[in-house]
Image (cartoon, rainbow, N blue to C red):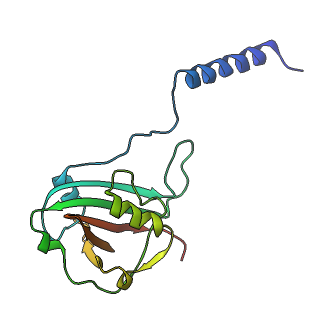
């Protein structure tokens, strides 16, 4: 048998949830965590050369979309750079395999980069088949830990894709 106090509590909780829903309150933050701070990017990862400008984002896989966060298997950095010197970033293609996280095709990326990542999401890419891309290995600035990924060039821009952390069960 339900008590009047319990019924009032349930009605009150339902009203609060309904008010939050009606007011547009969300449990998910739709704003992208995109940064344009070149100096901040360089405090995270060592770049081959200083870019003139950058857009970049770090995200986890699976990506947190609200409610209760689950375990993060991978942490990925995706950056789109405008280089001061194109040749500092563009080097001969190298053969290597890189896994592309499903969430990598960020909406703010230039179309060639977004398409490349979208078509190859959740697959391991053989970079020898992509002449505009090459494998890259660099280090995290603070720890000095090596990280691997790829870099691609198109239309005067450079894509940098790095797996910052791999926590997946091996």
In front of the other: 21 or 117: 117
Q: Is residue 7 left or right of residue 60?
A: right
Where's residue 137, x and y in %? 27, 77
Q: Is residue 60 left or right of residue 84?
A: right
Q: Is residue 62 left or right of residue 133?
A: right
Q: Is residue 3 left or right of residue 136?
A: right
In the image, residue 117 above or below residue 37? below
Where's residue 76, x and y in %? 38, 62
Where's residue 66, x and y in %? 53, 43
Q: Is residue 147 something one can see in this rendering?
A: no
In front of the other: 99 or 27: 99
Q: Is residue 165 something one can see in this rendering?
A: yes
Residue depicted at x 19% and y 68%: 47
User: Quadrant location of the N terminus?
Assistant: top right
In the image, residue 81 above or below residue 122? above
Residue depicted at x 34% and y 63%: 113
Residue depicted at x 55% and y 72%: 169
Where's residue 54, x and y in %? 21, 55
């Amino acid at each position: 048998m339900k008590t009047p106090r319990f019924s009032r509590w349930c009605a009150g909780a339902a009203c609060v949830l309904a008010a939050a829903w009606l007011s547009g309150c969300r449990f998910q933050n739709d704003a992208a965590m995109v940064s344009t701070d070149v100096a901040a990017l360089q405090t995270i990862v060592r770049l081959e050369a200083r870019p003139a400008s950058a857009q970049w984002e770090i995200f986890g896989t699976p990506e947190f979309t609200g409610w209760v966060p689950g375990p993060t298997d991978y942490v990925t950095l995706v950056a789109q750079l405008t280089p001061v010197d194109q040749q500092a970033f563009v080097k001969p293609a190298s053969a290597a395999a890189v896994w592309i996280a499903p969430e990598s095709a960020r909406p703010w990326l230039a179309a060639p980069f977004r398409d490349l990542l979208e078509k190859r999401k959740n697959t391991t890419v053989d970079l020898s088949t992509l002449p505009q891309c090459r494998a890259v290995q660099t280090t995290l600035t603070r720890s000095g830990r090596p990280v691997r990924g790829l870099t691609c060039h198109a239309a005067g821009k450079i894509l940098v894709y790095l797996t910052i952390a791999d926590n997946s069960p091996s």
